[in-house]
Amino acid sequence: MSALLVEEWQDKAACRGPQAEVFFPPPRTERRDEKAEREARAKSICNQCSVASACLEHALDVGEAHGIWGGRNEIERRNILLMRSDAN
């Protein structure tokens, strides 16, 4: 994916702005219920985003290890990659 295309989808991302903090864990330890609530808020933003699939593909392509990208957390992205590798 070219840098221009990355910039195009990023400019359209619903996560831009003050709500961006819910997409990554806080600097302090996060309780399990806090993490679940934060991730649910982030995923609800992704569900309304017109570029969520491009965001997810970018995270999968670069091996993004943290945060919510394209409506998926780290474990969900890892599972997608495992399923793709099993299919090949």
Image: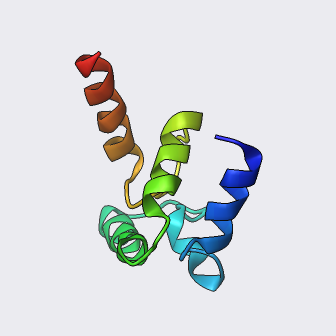
The image quadrant where one finds the N terminus is: top right
Image-quadrant location for residue 30: bottom left
From the top left corner, tell me how far across and down residue 31 is, in percent. Answer: 38, 64
Q: Measuring 57% from the left and 65% from the top, which residue is drawn there?
A: 26
Q: Which residue is depicted at the point 36% across and 31% down?
A: 81
Percent of width and height locating residue 82: 31, 26
Is residue 10 found left or right of 77 in the rendered image? right
Asked where in the image residue 41 lies, by quadrant, the reply is bottom left
Foreground of the two, 28 or 36: 36
What quarter of the picture does the C terminus occupy?
top left
Structure colour scheme = rainbow
| Residue 32 falls left or right of residue 12 | left
Q: Vertical placement of 15 versus 87: above or below?
A: below
- The front one of 22 and 14 is 14
In the displayed orientation, state which residue is furthest to the bottom.
Answer: 18
Whole-percent x and y of residue 48?
Answer: 39, 78
Residue 75 image position (x, y, % from top left): 34, 42
The vertical placement of 35 against 14, above or below, is above
| Residue at 51% in and 66% down | 23
Left or right of 68 on screen, residue 37 = left
- Reply above or below: 53 against 83: below
